Amino acid sequence: MISIIIPIFNAENYLKRMLESILGQSYQKFECILIDDGSSDSSYSICKEYEEKDTRMRCFTQKNHGVSYTRNKGISLARGKFIAFLDADDFIPPNYLYELVKCCEIGDVAICDTVFLDEKAVKFRFTVGKTVLTRTDAINALLIRKSINSGPAGKLYKKELIANLKFPSIKTYEDILFTLDALLNANKIVTTDRTQYFYVENNNGAMSKMIKNPSLDIIIATERLLQVIAQRKDLKPECCYVTVSHLFQYVIGLFQENNYRNSEFVDGTRKLFRKYMCLILTCRAIPWKEKLVFFLFGQGIFLQNGKRIHWIRKE
């Protein structure tokens, strides 16, 4: 049996679409754990409505604790051999569970394509293909961020693999840390292109808002990623390049918005760069010009177009 875990918060406009896509699955051996995380809309009422219709729906409610706490609670409630994480505002095709469980019967984790949609069209997709990956191959694909989506959705896990794992108690980038820990535990990861997960972007410019006011949780998550990259010599150098560049994009955004003075995020990123400067400077994938930018930033100088335009005040 598959235990499907869905954290729910103010999802009344999308929840029925997800639940109907679950009930329409060709693979019917599942339970669906619906956890309402303190919604102020009718989400919980919708959950109760579906629970009354189908005994496989298990409905819970709680005060608002955030998505990490809620998913961890779902893991503790799961009774199935396999665990799938879904989001309330997304949806899945009818063969989703069937194709993933076939893969997970021969591997520890099954992964399918993830299609990112907005209200109008497909924006982009992570394409995994059909193959069997080693732990190292899967972590490379995750950290380079080209084929494996960082979130827990679009995947099926053997419960025994993740039963003792926890989503970290941060509000941003908790998903990639959990996925990384799961892959570190796995021996065989099986991917399939015979189904896909539909991720619907309806967050009203959340990424743009994050660029202007990034959370310190991003630095916490990035440090964990760099720790793993530094420890594992079997990973591709692109893992370091992508991880460092991804963090630095937020710094660039703050400078473009002229919102860097006395910024905890800028100072925290600078300290992290200094801590891992040896890793950065010896990374073969990072062009030397970018290494120079990262090095000077670690010293408190921000370069743009090869010119020093800002001095970052140090404590």
Image (cartoon, helix red, strand yellow):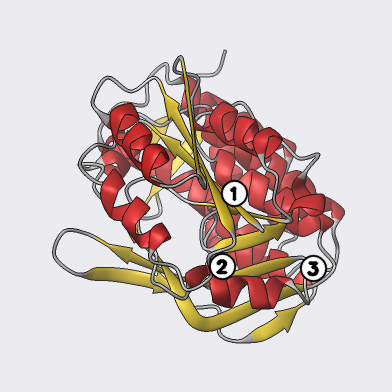
Image quarter hosting the C terminus:
top right
**Amino acid carrying mark 2 in the image:** Ile
State how far apart marks 3 and 1 are (Cα). 15 Å
Q: Which residue is mark 1?
A: 176
* Contact (Cβ within 8 Å) of mark 1 with mark 2: no
Please tell me in which quadrant of the rendered image residue 128 appears.
Answer: bottom right
**Amino acid carrying mark 1 in the image:** Ile
- Can residue 273 be seen here? The reply is no
State how far apart marks 1 and 2 are (Cα). 10 Å
Q: Earlier in the sequence, mark 3 or mark 1?
A: 3
The image position of residue 3, as x and y in percent, is 61, 50
**Residue drawn at the location 44% of the way across and 68% of the way down:** 25
Mark 3 is surrounded, within 10 Å at the Cα level, by few (under 14), some (14 to 19) or many (20 or more) other residues, namely: some
Secondary element at tag 1:
helix
The image position of residue 294, as x and y in percent, is 56, 47
Residue 148's tag is 2
Q: Earlier in the sequence, mark 1 or mark 2?
A: 2
Secondary element at tag 3:
helix
- In the depicted structure, whether residue 272 falls above or below residue 133: above
**Amino acid carrying mark 3 in the image:** Arg
Q: Which residue is mark 3?
A: 135
Q: How many marks?
A: 3
**Residue drawn at the location 80% of the way across and 53% of the way down:** 161
Q: Earlier in the sequence, mark 2 or mark 3?
A: 3
The image position of residue 115, as x and y in percent, is 37, 69
Residue 74's tag is none
**Residue drawn at the location 49% of the way across and 20% of the way down:** 264
- In the depicted structure, whether residue 277 falls above or below residue 21: above
- In the depicted structure, whether residue 69 falls above or below residue 181: above
